[in-house]
Amino acid sequence: MIVDLFKIPIFIGNINVKKIIFKNKNFNKTWISETPSSYNQSFENVSNMKNENIKYLLETIVKILEEKIQYPFELNLQNIWENNYVNNDYQEPHIHPKSDFSFIIYKDVQEGKTVFLNPIRNFLMIYSNISHMFKSEFMPKCKNGQIVIFPSFLEHMVLKSSKQKTISGNLGFKKK
């Protein structure tokens, strides 16, 4: 018998990116990588969307999560922003603190460049005789009009890319 312990699910689904509309688009160089983004540290950028767009987004995410979560729950959108990868821009490895789930919407991409990192990858390097048995990273094959939803504690990064646009955000989760 084999038992897979401590699985970390990520969810991939489809979303109509034309329904995710921002009122204002102010991009600044952010992160260590200086990737152009509308990210706002004050977490007030949810007000940068119309209520009907937020409603559509949350309804779409709930439908995707319901495949795994078999009890009533509610979500609240904590923040949302756009990333505009221009000239070999990237995102360094990071997590999304103070939230439960996070998401990435692939708005305009040739191919998704997101890489999820195994939380125990550093320990795997120590045990070189068995490290080959475990994946240290995972890169979903996402394309335009797809969304990936993941626990916010899951470290991830974005490889160098150009002429690509994504939308990212954070969610609060509450069991009803």
Image (cartoon, rainbow, N blue to C red):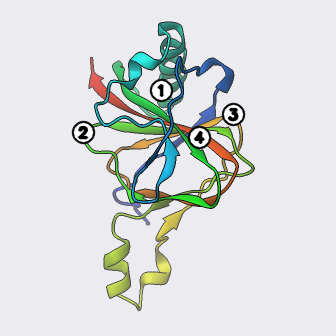
Instruction: Tell me residue 166's x, y (percent).
Output: 59, 40
Whole-number angstrom distance, CA of label 4 to CA of label 2: 21 Å
The label shown at residue 66 is 1
> Residue at (47%, 38%) from the top-left corner?
103
Is residue 121 among the parts visible in the rendering? yes
Label 3: state its secondary structure.
loop
Q: Position of residue 13 (x, y in %)?
A: 61, 34
Residue pointed to by mark 4: 166
Quadrant, the C terminus: top left
Please state which amino acid type lies under the numbered disc 3.
Answer: Gly
Q: Badge 3 local density, few (<14 within 10 Å), some, or many (20+)? A: some
Residue matched to label 3: 145
Q: Quadrant of the N terminus?
A: bottom left
**Residue nearer the viewer, 89 or 176:** 89
- Residue 98, numbered circle: 2
| 1 or 4: mark nearer the eye | 4
**Who comes first in sequence, dot 1 or dot 4?**
1
Q: CA distance from mark 1 to mark 2?
A: 22 Å
Residue 14 lies in what quarter of the image?
Answer: top right
Confirm or deny contact between disc 1 and disc 4 (CB under 8 A). no
Crowding around mark 1 (Cα neighbors within 10 Å: few <14, some 14 to 19, many 20+) is few
Amino acid bearing label 2: Lys
- Comparing marks 3 and 1, which lies closer to the viewer? 3
Give the mark nearest the N terminus, 3 or 1: 1
Q: Position of residue 71 (x, y in %)?
A: 35, 23
Alpha-carbon distance for marks 3 and 2? 27 Å
Measured Cα–Cα span from mark 3 to mark 1: 19 Å
Query: Which of disc 2 and disc 3 is earlier in sequence?
Result: 2
Residue 93 vs 122, above or below: the answer is above
Q: Amino acid at mark 4?
A: Thr
Q: Which residue is found at the position 40% from the left and 59% from the top?
A: 32
